[in-house]
Image (tube, rainbow, N blue to C red):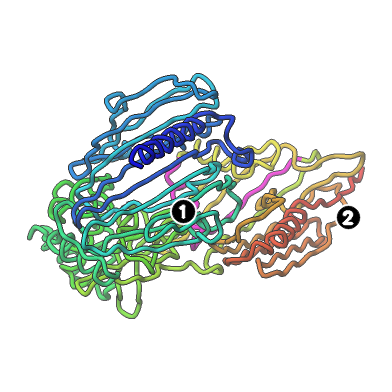
Amino acid sequence: MKNITILAVCLLLVQAALSQEELFTSSTIPDQLTVDANAVIRKNDVIITVESYDEFEVITDRIVTVLNKKGLGDIKAGESYNDDIEIEKMEATIYDASGEKIERFKSKAFKDVSAVPNGTLYSDNRLMYLDYTPRSYPFTVHFTSKVVYSSTAFLPGWKPLEYFYASTENAHYRIINESDVEIKVKESNLENYSVVKNGELDYTASNLTAILPQAYSPDFSTYGPLVKVALKRFIMNGVDGVNTDWVEFGKWMNDALLSDVGELPQSVIDEVKVLTKDAITQREKAMIVYNFMQVRSRYISVQVGIGGWKPIEAAKVHEVAYGDCKGLSNYTKALLNEVGIESHHAIIYGDRNIRSIDSEFSSTQGNHMILYVPQLDKEQNIWLECTSKTNPFGYIAGWTDDRDALVVSKEGGKIIHTTIYETDTNLQKSTAQIELKKDGSAVASIDMTTSGYQYSFKDQWDKKSQKDLKKAYSNYWSHLNGIHIDKAKVITDVELVEVRESVNLTVDKYGSKTGDLLLIQPVFFNRNDSEPTKYKDRYTDFEIDRGYVDVDNYEIKLDIGFKVDALPDNVELKSKFGNYKLTITDTGSGSLKIIRYLKINKGYFNKEDYELYREFSAEIVKHDNSKAVLKIIK
């Protein structure tokens, strides 16, 4: 019986080896997994063993077939390390398309680099990764590693479908909990994919086809398969932490990371008190302090301390006149505190795309810190971006607006939503005078005022040289043939939070001549030229994350010898996606009057409505590009 058991085990091992060898051969990939894929994850086994609240190990066995150059980023053969992360073992083997071994790399052959961008002044995080240039495609990489973590605040979760353009043939994720600490779990969207739950904290996925990014899709985490995990008790760089809920997690952050970094030198305390002594309102005081911080400090990334989460002391930031988002936010908080204004650290995701802290799952989340001021006089919920030297006071549009943040105080953590810039406030207004010449050329001037979220598009244009401004506007209005910017002026008003622009230009070929007729497009400047992408299969809902309003008033003065022959019909479109109105009027005194109004609504819409949105957008494009016909009188 014993011999039979040994034989059975041997056969299983041989079978497993043969099965794995098949994964090194590109021809064994199921056809459906190569569709829209730049790489195929043939196997990705991740076994995490939590030995105690202050230690866990991760064993990875990963096989990836790279189909083309764009799939190189999906290899992911590498590990980060620092004083709390030790790479015990790591190697990679390369196979050609037929499964023949090309090269083997031990850990010493991996490239060792800083794990943070060049803009970081100093950091204790490093990365070892495989730097391999293939001779041909496809090829396969087999990567294995064993990593031990003595800082347990960041327990790796699971994304069996890793991102766009990569399919997954097999993935296995398992956590073995040998500690007495409970592990929190949140499963998202697994029911929509071929994922099997084998048991507690044990999952398998198979044959997940690659997906493509689609325009206006919400964040990938809202529809991709995902398992989040976190220890209820953890350690971060030697500091014990508690994570039962956001209240307790926030209290830990405040007590362990933030409570001892707010002291300032007496000299700066005296200075800000002098600066604010004549301020009448709390808001005025806060604005003076914020401006003080902006003028004397600059942003530099610093990735050291407790997990990169603990700010540098406020006194140190004042001394060196720089800091990262944590340091500058903490410095500003300390300054505000000295003039009697309450504020709190806020952890958030900073990104042009809107991404919220998960309010239902407390854990180490976020990539940025800003400052939350509960109240100034009668105004509530003010947010300060402390890494910008130019942001108006309380302005956060375009990077941290309209999302959930974790606000930390001595009472604990609280999820609070940041400022929403309402559609009607995201306004661009323009007034233009255009003189149309008989040869089809035009001379024009335009004044524009932009506010709300749209302010963030051009708030730095006032710093451009005249040469760069001319280039920027030429690109901005590239639909005008033969455009020449003669003069441009931009004023950024941080008090009113608006950008004011004045531009003079000429256009060599505005009109198109056909016999004794001249065809022009009356919507001269602010013209939509493209429609949203059409998809045969729209698989995600879609989101317009920020609404806006454009109001344009143009007058086109016709040269002597022109007579209006035909004008586009006036149009008004109304839908749940927004409103559009265009009127083109012959004044009867040698000019055309154009009034254009476009409002796009913020909203989350079902995927079935996407084609309706495309149709609405297509109608706008059609009317924006409609033509008027002028008769040339000889």
Locate residue 170 relative to residue 112 in the image: left or right.
right
Question: Where residue 49 appears, x then y in whole percent?
Answer: 27, 50
SS label for mark 2: strand
Q: Residue furthest left?
A: 266
Question: Would you say residue 100 sits in the magenta stretch?
Answer: no
Locate residue 201 relative to residue 192 in the image: left or right.
left
Of 534 and 625, the residue lying toward us:
534
Question: Where residue 239 appears, x then y in whole percent?
Answer: 15, 57
Question: Which is in the foreground here, disc 2 or disc 1?
Answer: 1
Locate residue 20 relative to residue 384 in the image: left or right.
right
Locate residue 59 relative to residue 55 in the image: left or right.
right
Of 274 and 266, the residue lying toward us:
266
Q: Residue 352 carries which label?
A: 1
Question: Which residue is pictured at 26% across the width and 46% down the height?
Answer: 57
Q: Give the range drawn in magenta.
A: 441-464
Of 382 and 484, the residue lying toward us:
382
- Circle 2 packing at 10 Å, graded few (<14), some (14-19), many (20+), is few
Q: In the picture, residue 590 is in which quadrant? A: bottom right
Question: Which residue is pictured at 68% across the width and 42% down the height?
Answer: 479
Q: Residue 478 carries which label?
A: none
Q: Which amino acid type is marked by label 2?
A: Ala
Up-down: is 190 above or below 36?
below
Q: Which residue lies furthest to the front in this view?
A: 1
Q: Which amino acid type is marked by label 1?
A: Arg
Question: Which residue is pictured at 51% across the width and 41% down the height?
Answer: 469
Which numbered disc, 2 or 1, marks the residue that appears first in the sequence? 1
Return the residue at label 2.
Answer: 566
Question: Which residue is pictured at 65% across the width and 55% down the height?
Answer: 432
Up-down: is 174 above or below 378?
above
SS label for mark 1: loop
